[in-house]
Image: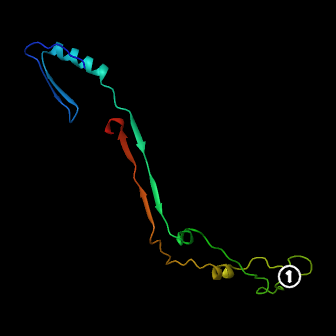
């Protein structure tokens, strides 16, 4: 604790809840007190605490991923299905993705119910403990 002597007409009132000082005195003494406060008033070190909480059930992975499928289009395009590409077989270049569309089962109406994402950042000063 530091004390600065004040003349009889000066006064200091401290407010602990808001960490404020109210000083009334002559201008030269106010400058001296302001210089002293600037030396001793340093900000309190702070710590950032951040948490990310994810709740998921056993079907959660199905709603997030991508499912791809394929079919042998060589038979649909005039080739011989079931044989390896090359040699005397016909090779289909191009085609469409109808076979892939038939294999995926994640529809447009897929919902992400029963999932909760929480992000709660908080600034905490060391004098709050």
Measured as percent of width and height from the top left, residue 115 is found at 45, 67
Q: Residue furthest left?
A: 9
Residue at x 56%, y 77% (from the top left corner)? 106
Q: Secondary structure at mark 1?
A: loop
Q: Is residue 97 left or right of residue 79?
A: left
Q: Nearer the viewer, residue 5 or 83?
A: 5
Residue at x 11%, y 12% (from the top left corner)? 7
The quarter of the picture where the N terminus appears is top left
Q: Which residue is mark 1?
A: 83
Q: Is residue 16 above or below residue 73?
A: above
Image quadrant in which you'd find residue 9 = top left
Residue at x 34%, y 32% (from the top left corner)? 44
Measured as percent of width and height from the top left, residue 126 is found at 36, 36
Q: Is residue 108 left or right of residue 103?
A: left
Q: Is residue 17 above or below residue 55?
A: above
Number of labelled discs?
Answer: 1
Measured as percent of width and height from the top left, residue 18 is found at 21, 35
Image color mode: rainbow
Residue at x 41%, y 39% (from the top left corner)? 47
Measured as percent of width and height from the top left, residue 88 is found at 92, 81
Q: Is residue 128 above or below residue 83?
A: above
Q: Would you call the spot at circle 1 few (<14 residues within 10 Å), some (14-19), or many (20 or more)?
A: few
């Amino acid at each position: 604790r530091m004390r600065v002597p004040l003349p009889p007409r000066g006064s200091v009132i401290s407010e602990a809840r808001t960490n404020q000082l109210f000083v009334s005195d002559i201008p030269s003494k106010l400058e001296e007190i302001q210089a002293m406060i600037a030396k001793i008033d340093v900000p309190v070190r702070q710590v950032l605490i951040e948490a990310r909480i994810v709740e998921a059930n056993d079907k959660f992975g199905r709603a997030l991923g991508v499912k791809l499928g394929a079919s042998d289009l060589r038979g649909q395009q005039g080739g011989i299905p079931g044989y390896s590409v090359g040699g005397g077989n016909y090779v289909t270049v191009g085609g469409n993705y109808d076979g892939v569309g038939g294999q995926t089962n994640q529809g447009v109406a897929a919902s992400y119910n029963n999932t909760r994402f929480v992000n709660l950042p908080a600034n905490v000063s060391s004098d709050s403990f």
